[in-house]
Image (cartoon, helix red, strand yellow):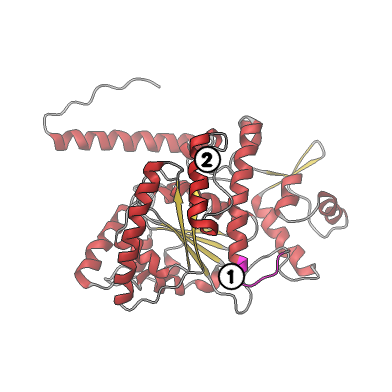
Amino acid sequence: MELMTPIEADVPADLALQVSQRLKSAVKGHLLQAFAPDHTKSMRLISAPEAAELLNASPPFIRKCHNDGTLPEPSINRNGRRYYSVSELWEYRQLLDKQARVPGKYLPWRRDGESLQVWQLMNFKGGCSKTTATAHIAHYLALHGFRVLLIDLDPQGSLTGMCGLDPQTEFGSKTIYDAITVNDPCPMEKVIRPTFLPGLFLAPAQLILSEFKMEARATGNFHTRLRDAIAQVQGQFDVVLIDSPPELDILTLTGMAAATSLLVPLTPSMMDLSSTALFMELVSSYMKVITEHGAELHYDHFRFLVTRDEPTDGPSQQLVGFLRTLFTDMVMSATSFKSTAVSDATMLKQSIYELDRADVTRSTYDRARVSMDAVGAEIREMIESTWRREKA
């Protein structure tokens, strides 16, 4: 990378502005390079074995469906090997589910009587991989056929960026702020945008979301705003995932009032454990405030997710064991491994699911993928247990 001229400014405000402008330009150039040529994200092609696994079917069954015309051939065939786009897999789910003996085998959507699942991921400790976990869980669920809505409640818009949108400059359309603002809110459906994955939608964030904090303080009316906005579109989704800001503020409390389950990511370090202890103490206090304002809080699940886990590191594993001793089944069995594959993907605002296995060391990819699949599968199991579905 070519070295740039040093930034010089006599006034601190001018210095800060120049730093901001240079960073914005660099990030925009990085995104253009990563998402070239049209600055939009696209999902890699899916191999035949992985496609069968995502569809919960065997490779021979999928081949049979192609041969007898049940499923159309994918558009990509390289030397006799089929490769699928995520759009084709979404279409196959519809076709297979119509012919399935048990409805819902290929489309695990909500059924009559099953309530919308709203999960909030929250912690005020930065670096706990909260946004990374949110994106990976969302990608897992969408790739397995669920209709998922992501809500970015962080004014910094990190999750929005992982969905391929520049939260500050790329679009001038509506954001989640417009749906929850006290001043003339717009319908939630005008906020939601499709993403590069079929079934996955986003209510994006921009810096203006910070204004909601001031509005809420002025009016005292905040805890029902997000819940009511979600209710407007609840028939379109099975799962909602809320990514909170890395602080316990009014935005986080708004998410808590809308959520049906809470997930607290934390890393296995003594500093994180101490921080989380303080966080949970404040959560308790603020929950009382919310209920005093008339909100009824009930959570189907309240879990801790260990992130950046290193199974071969003795001290960190002692802390993981310590957590499990303290909180037993409140700590998820699956953990999110610390992985260079995940870190490298995150630098490009991607998840492990977007990476091609051939682009990284295969053992590193497989280790990270198995970890993230396990986290996603455990979340799915909790969701379906709330719906009282029998295990497949």
Type of secondary structure dominating the magenta stretch: loop
Q: Find disc 1 in the rendering and name its residue.
A: 386
Taking the image as shown, residue 355 lies to the left or right of residue 281, namely: right
Q: Residue 298 at what x, y percent from top left? A: 45, 73
Relative to residue 249, is residue 297 drawn left or right? Answer: right
Location of mark 2 (residue): 317
Segment tinted magenta in the rendering: 384-391
Tell me which residue sits at (41%, 69%) in the image: 258
Q: Quadrant of residue 122?
A: bottom left
The reply to whether residue 164 is in sight is no
In this rendering, position of residue 318 left or right of residue 275: right
Name the spot of residue 337 as percent of width and height, x first.
Answer: 55, 41
Residue 212 lies in the magenta-colored region: no
* Location of the C terminus (image quadrant): bottom right
SS label for mark 2: helix
> Along the polypeptide, which appears first: circle 1 or circle 2?
2
* Image quadrant assignment for residue 366: top right
